[in-house]
Amino acid sequence: MKSLTKAEEEVMLVVWDLGRGFLKDIMEHMPDPKPHSNTVATILKILVEKGFVEYEVQGRNNLYKPRVSKADYGQKSINQLVKGYFEGSPAKLVSQFVNDNKLSQEELESLLQQIKNAQNNQQ
């Protein structure tokens, strides 16, 4: 799976949220300041070429829908982030969040419980 540029990711976030939509629908949901519709149309064409989006022709318009789920792309992105910036160690990523006070006590306890549950399910 290829990576997305920032502009491509912005469009994909809208497509993922909508589930499917025409160019006008996607434009309506783009964050401000909205890019020009020609720019979004070009990005959608690139996303089709990269395999992230597919479309079906309906009359004179294309109905766009995601081919890659947000969860799948998110998992790939996290794996790349961990590999590139945290020496391949998910623990170092979590440790960074802890050091930056980005995780509450409740979130840390929830993570610990998830780890314990996963270990119990593997046994």
Image (cartoon, rainbow, N blue to C red):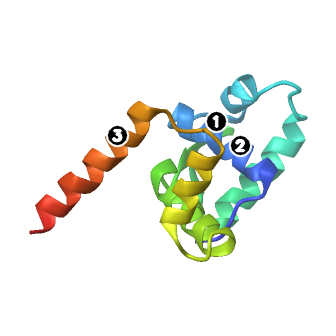
Q: Which residue is mark 1?
A: 14
The percent position of residue 54, horizontal first and vertical second, equals 57, 54
Q: Are marks 1 and 3 in contact (CB under 8 Å)?
A: no
Q: CA distance from mark 3 to mark 2?
A: 35 Å
- Identify the residue shown where x is 79% and y is 45%: 41
- Identify the residue shown where x is 41% and y is 41%: 108
Q: CA distance from mark 1 to mark 3?
A: 33 Å
Q: Which residue is mark 2?
A: 11
The percent position of residue 89, horizontal first and vertical second, equals 52, 71
User: Residue 109's mark?
Assistant: 3
Which quarter shows the C terminus?
Answer: bottom left
Q: Secondary structure at mark 1?
A: helix
- Please identify the quarter of the rendering in which residue 64 is found: top right
Identify which residue, 6 or 67, lies in the foreground: 6
User: Label 3 amino acid?
Assistant: Glu
Q: Badge 2 local density, few (<14 within 10 Å), some, or many (20+)? A: many
Which quarter shows the N terminus?
Answer: bottom right
Q: Are marks 1 and 2 in contact (CB under 8 Å)?
A: yes
Q: Secondary structure at mark 3?
A: helix
